[in-house]
Amino acid sequence: MMKNSFRILFVCLFLVSCQQKITPEDIHKLNGYWEIEKVSFKEGEDKEYKMNENFDYFEIANNKGIRRKVRPQFNGTFLFNEDFENVKVRFEKEQVFLDYSTPYAKWTEELVKLTDEEMCIKNDQNKEYEYKKAGPVNLLKDGEETK
């Protein structure tokens, strides 16, 4: 009996963990660099990321834009190639979707949380990707991060 109560509580917490009402006025918060912190799988497992080689960069205006993978450099700049995904933001009832397209594929992810500092995106396999807002990584010669 107690075991079932804990399972129900865990499932409820998992479902609520990333949920938040997102409005059209919030979409500008997508713009910028995002570093993935954790992936939550529907089976209940989590994978945490301590350090990332790549960040996601979003540039959205009027609910359209791009997402590209970028690589932070020690001098505070970012390396990127010419590859990117077109993104359209779509509001449907209480949900917000990011519709991606490239010359080779189309797919959709749900934007379930978006604040100035955090974002959560859920894909079609119910994996939730939790991001934190990132900026340039600027290291001094002694390896310490600049302020």
Image: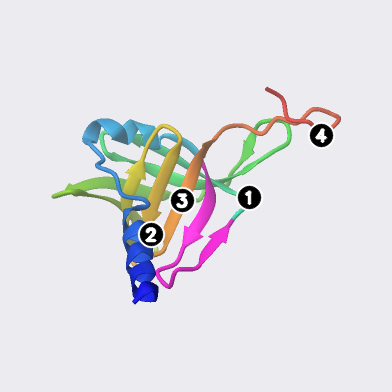
Real-space CA distance between mark 1 and mark 3, rounded to the nearest whole angstrom: 13 Å
Please report contact status of discs 3 and 4: CB closer than 8 Å, yes or no. Answer: no
Q: Of discs 4 and 2, which sits in the foreground?
A: 4
Q: Is residue 24 left or right of residue 8?
A: left
Q: Magenta stretch? A: 34-48
Q: Which residue is mark 1?
A: 52
Pick whichever of labels 3 and 4 is earlier in the sequence.
Answer: 3
Q: Is residue 61 visible?
A: no
Q: Between residue 56 and residue 126, name the one nearer to us.
A: 126
Q: Is residue 102 left or right of residue 78?
A: left
> Which residue position holds label 4?
143
Residue at 34% from the left image edge and 63% from the top image edge: 9
Q: What kind of element bears circle 4? A: loop
Q: Quadrant of the C terminus?
A: top right
Residue 78 picture quarter: top right
Residue drawn 81% across the image and 34% down it: 143
Give the label, 1 or 3, closer to the camera.
Answer: 3
